[in-house]
């Protein structure tokens, strides 16, 4: 019987940081911290079975930081003009109800 050892998540993050810093000489610790901050959202977004497109999932096609900012700042009294049809329309509709 073969034993399978799971490595702790910090190992993966360290290896990703090392790989990114070797490939990109302009890599800063701020970039790494943002990666850690949004890693779980990114992982969920690629495993999301609710929908394969932004329209189906109801998520806008913008960065996770921008989504987070909109979720914090939008209120029910706000009025928004959004051009186009897609996940951002559905997202804003949910946020402004």
Image (cartoon, rainbow, N blue to C red):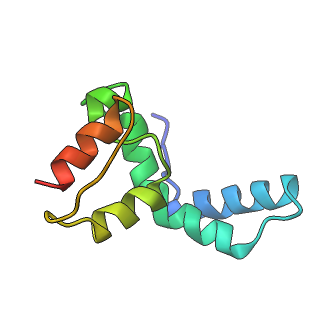
- Closer-to-camera residue (64/10): 64
Please report the residue visible at 45 percent of the width from the left and 40 percent of the height from the top. 61
Q: Is residue 64 above or below residue 50?
A: below
Please report the residue visible at 17 percent of the width from the left and 55 percent of the height from the top. 96
Give the left or right position of residue 96, taking residue 44 as reference: left
Answer whether residue 14 is visible to the viewer in this image. yes
| Corner quadrant of residue 11 | bottom right
| Corner quadrant of residue 77 | bottom left
Answer whether residue 49 is visible to the viewer in this image. no
- Closer-to-camera residue (65/10): 65
Please report the residue visible at 29 percent of the width from the left and 38 percent of the height from the top. 89
Please report the residue visible at 45 percent of the width from the left and 34 percent of the height from the top. 1
| Corner quadrant of residue 79 | bottom left
- Closer-to-camera residue (19/77): 77
Q: Is residue 81 above or below residue 18?
A: above
Looking at this view, name the residue that lies furthest to the right: 25
Q: Position of residue 52 (x, y in %)?
A: 36, 25
Q: Is residue 53 above or below residue 38?
A: above
- Closer-to-camera residue (20/58): 58
Q: Position of residue 7 (x, y in %)?
A: 53, 56
Q: Position of residue 41 (x, y in %)?
A: 40, 53
């Amino acid at each position: 019987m073969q034993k399978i050892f799971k490595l702790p998540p910090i190992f993966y993050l360290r290896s990703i940081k090392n790989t990114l810093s070797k490939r990109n000489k302009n890599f800063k610790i701020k970039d790494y911290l943002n990666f850690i901050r949004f890693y779980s959202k990114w992982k969920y977004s690629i495993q999301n079975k609710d929908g394969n497109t932004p329209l189906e999932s109801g998520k806008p096609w913008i960065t996770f930081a921008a989504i987070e900012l909109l979720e914090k700042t939008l209120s029910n009294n706000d009025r928004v003009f959004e051009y186009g049809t897609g996940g951002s329309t559905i997202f804003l509709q949910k946020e402004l109800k």
